[in-house]
Amino acid sequence: MSKPPVKYSGPDRVFSGVQPSGDMHLGNYLGALKKFADLQNDHECVYCIVDLHAVTVWQDPAKLAGQTRNIAAAYLASGVDPDKAIIYPQSKVAAHTELAWYFNCVARIGWLSRMTQFKEKSGRNAEAMSVGLYDYPVLQAADILAFKATHVPVGEDQKQHLELSRDIAQKFNNDFNVPGFFPLPEPLIKGPGARVMSLRDGTKKMSKSDPSDNSRINLTDSPEKIAKKIRKAKTDAGVMPETVAEMEDRPELKNLVGIYGAFSGLSDQEVLSQYAGQGFGVFKPALADLAVEILRPVSERMNTYLDNPDEIDRILAKGADAAAEIATPIVADVRKVMGFWGT
Ligand code: TYM
């Protein structure tokens, strides 16, 4: 009989990251940031601004540091407390890139070639993409496992990358005969905001890279702009149905109901029970009011932080030291496990 796999026995730790490559939108907020703040009270949490991931596509050097501060401000404005959670920029902690190299030698080309996000981002132009963009999920696995993180709050689009992280952790543990050395990190994806769709097309996810600004609500949008985007959101000619099953072929409706639920804490069915039989002329203004009520204080707090970049820089520098303190010894152990000279 084969022996049962040895389970990781280290402490629970939460890790996640956001790329500093454009404005934060409602999908980032509901899929990630809101969960970050919720988790910090009863977990050790490490929240990274993944600037090394951002440069897998060209970033303007004159803007990169500012974009990093922007994400830090969004973390803080969403309620992440630097006294409870670590907030830091990825490029300040060398453990990420070092572990990524070791993982490059563990992960298989076949695994990476199945990654749908690379296919979506590169389109028909894969040959012209950077090697970094292809290798992106290996760096993501290194981010998580340099902290031996056990839980990773993300939106649904990151599911496949998390599976790859688990595969890499498992293969490393097997290849070097160190059962339980790395945990198999679990994605925390559940919840109503895990997949927020475009306001212009309910079958496409809300994304920074969508050319239409009306497709997304940015955290920095004014209340008037938020209300306008919701008013203009694509819908069908029907009225609000009574049951969730009736939303099946109505992706735009389903998305708006999901957003309402994520803001209000109601289930889809509870939202429908409140609005069944009403038209979008009633539902959309109610959703806009709710969105503004929740997002206005976030964007106001974000601006307050951005008016004070020295404070952000202080938080990031302190966070980088704290992050390095955790990750550096873990990567030193990896070196030892792999048998490098001098370990
Ligand atoms: P990024 O920067 O694209 O997105 C940041 C977070 O927002 C979530 N998200 C969404 N959630 C719901 N609906 C949407 N429409 C939506 N769009 C984005 C993403 O799932 C993510 O949680 N690869 C990651 C960054 C990363 C990372 C990591 C995450 C790098 N290393 C390690 C976790 C752990 C990314 O590109 O996120």
Image (spheres, helix red, strand yellow):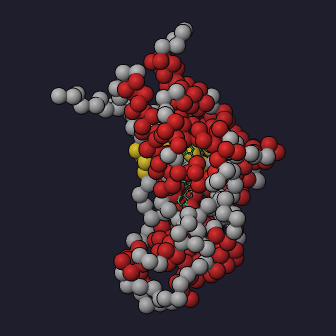
Coordinates of residue 235 in the picture (x, y in percent): 55, 81
Instruction: Pick out the residue farthest to the left.
Output: 1
Whether 333 is drawn above or below 19: the answer is above
The front one of 306 and 253 is 253
Instruction: Pick out the residue farthest to the right.
Output: 62
Image-based side of 274 in relation to 327, left or right: left
The front one of 126 and 234 is 126
Residue at horizontal 68 percent and vertical 41 percent from the top: 130
| Residue 83 visible here | no
Whether 142 is drawn above or below 71: the answer is above
Residue at horizontal 70 percent and vertical 65 percent from the top: 211
Q: Tell how many labels.
A: 0
Quadrant containing the N terminus in the rendered view: top left
Whether 196 is drawn above or below 237: the answer is above
Image-based side of 92 in relation to 330, left or right: right
Quadrant in the picture for residue 175: top left
Coordinates of residue 117 in the picture (x, y in percent): 56, 51
The front one of 271 and 316 is 271
Coordinates of residue 315 in the picture (x, y in percent): 65, 41
Coordinates of residue 343 in the picture (x, y in percent): 51, 11
Residue at horizontal 70 percent and vertical 74 percent from the top: 225
Residue at horizontal 53 percent and vertical 43 percent from the top: 113
Instruction: Pick out the residue farthest to the top.
Output: 342
| Residue 259 visible here | yes
